[in-house]
Amino acid sequence: MNLPIAHIDALFAAWDRPDSPGCALGIVHAGELVYARGYGMADLEHGVPITPATVFDIASISKQFTAWCVLALAEEGQLSLDDPIQRFCPEVPEYGQRITLHHLLHHTSGLRDYLGIWPVAGLPDANVFRREDVYATIARQRELNFAPGSDYIYSNTGYWLLGEVVQRVSGQTLREFAHEQVFAPLGMASTHFHDDFTEIEPNRALGHALRGDGSLRLDLSFCDLVGDGGIYTTVEDLARWDAVFYASPLAGGDALIAQMHVPGRLVDGSAISYARGLVIGAYRGARTVSHGGSWAGYRSSLLRFPDERFTVICLANLASMEPWKLAHQVADLCLGSRLGPATNIPGGAPVAVGDAAFAGVYRNTAWDEPLTLSWQAEGLHLTAPWYGFDGVLAAAGEGAYAIAGETDLRVEIEPGSADDAPAAVIHIQGEPPRRFAR
């Protein structure tokens, strides 16, 4: 594959400086890491640059490894995906409804996300909480968001519990089990579930975030929780993992990998895009298998085009970076005409001045996901940090809006009435719509 290296590097030029955090990029094609490079600094205090061997916290990309571990135990007959979670974790309340491992894998359990509960409850930063705090939070919840299997809401609680299941069934920590079954066989020597935040990690990129005045600050993880996140790894090691999706030498072989790709299905028969630790979608007409990650001052994206045997890995140590967007831009450059035309790019005028009345902070009704619409000189500005969207809305059809260049986002704004406040409905390609109320 002939790569447009200069154009790829130009995408990351803003961070490729000795005074900026940045990211590591890996491009995999036909089983080979064909391009790997670091941009910016892993450690500003000591002047350490990012390289392909730099270690990052990949946050929720970790979920696919947890899913593999659960499926491997099921393959061995040590558990069934139809088992109720209470069989392994009796600390979880019954709620009067059966929650299975199957529900947890697909985010259809109805369990509230502990990361959303803690700020609402006025509890300290979740970044310093331990496993006993998660169990205590779950135990305090008197009801579910919805009946298991009836809806989809992304829940870190479910995957953290799956990590607990692996430990209790295997008799090993999730870190030990994953090392023995996955990381060591694949030669992923720089990868592990980081279940001790006090542990010294050579070659680690330090997380960063921007202050209100634009200056940088450290934004590190002080969290021992794993399963829903917690893997430390490199683009080089993730390239080794990527090869498993075409020919797996691991236990269960290709059949187990195929199980990871099975999309969830609700009780009404409708399919969802979330499979087992993987998001099954499409981009410009091409099939994609992907996941992103966001935790402390780390952002990450793993974007695979299986039919092209092409994958982009982007690991960042700056909270304001958008690896998901950058990975798609790299794919645009490398795959070019192999992809279909871009869609859903707004062609209308900026939102009218009269729509300034929609400004405000909106929150998801199921958990505390913030979305902000602010009126600025150029128009109505949308900020959705959990999704990585930030830009000015423009008309994209009657009652619909989008951000220029965001081909997988559509926003519908409901004006509200005398009795109801305005609401925003977010449509992201491959995901169920999410409603936010002001």
Image: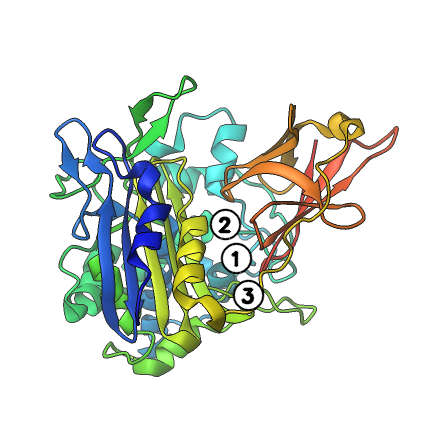
Residue closer to the observer: 32 or 345? 345
Q: Residue 386: percent from the left, percent from the top?
A: 50, 41
Q: Residue at x 73, y 45 (%)?
A: 348
Question: Does the image show residue 80?
Answer: no
- In-image side of 270 versus 205 (left or right): right
Look at the image and tell me in which quarter the C terminus lies.
top right
Q: CA distance from mark 1 to mark 3?
A: 26 Å
Identify residue type, mark 2.
Answer: Ser
Query: Depth check: 100 or 306 in front?
Result: 306
Looking at the image, is mark 2 or mark 3 nearer the viewer?
3
Query: Label 2: which residue?
Result: 155
Q: Mark 1 or mark 3: which is in front?
A: 3
Percent coordinates x, y for residue 283 in the rendering: 53, 64
> Residue placed at 45% from the left, 72% from the top?
261
Asked where in the image residue 391 lies, by quadrant, the reply is: top right
**Residue at image x 40%, y 43%?**
294
| Circle 2/circle 1 CB separation < 8 Å | yes
For label 1, the residue is 107
Residue 276 horizontal/vertical position (percent)? 45, 66
Furthest residue toward right: 418
- Vertically, is 42 above or below 121? below
Viewer-nearest residue: 120 or 380: 380
Q: Is residue 429 visible?
A: yes
Instruction: Point out the tag, 2 or 1, that comes first from the N-terminus.
Output: 1
Estimate how packed mark 2 is, as few (under 14), some (14 to 19) or many (20 or more) residues with alpha carbons within 10 Å: many
Q: Mark 2 and mark 1: span between their CA atoms?
A: 6 Å
Question: Callout 1: helix, strand or loop?
Answer: loop
* Dot 3: element: loop
Please give the residue where the numbered disc 3 appears in the rendered image: 284
**Viewer-proximal residue among 356 and 153:** 356
**Crowdedness of circle 1 by 10 Å Cα count: few (<14), some, many (20+)?**
many
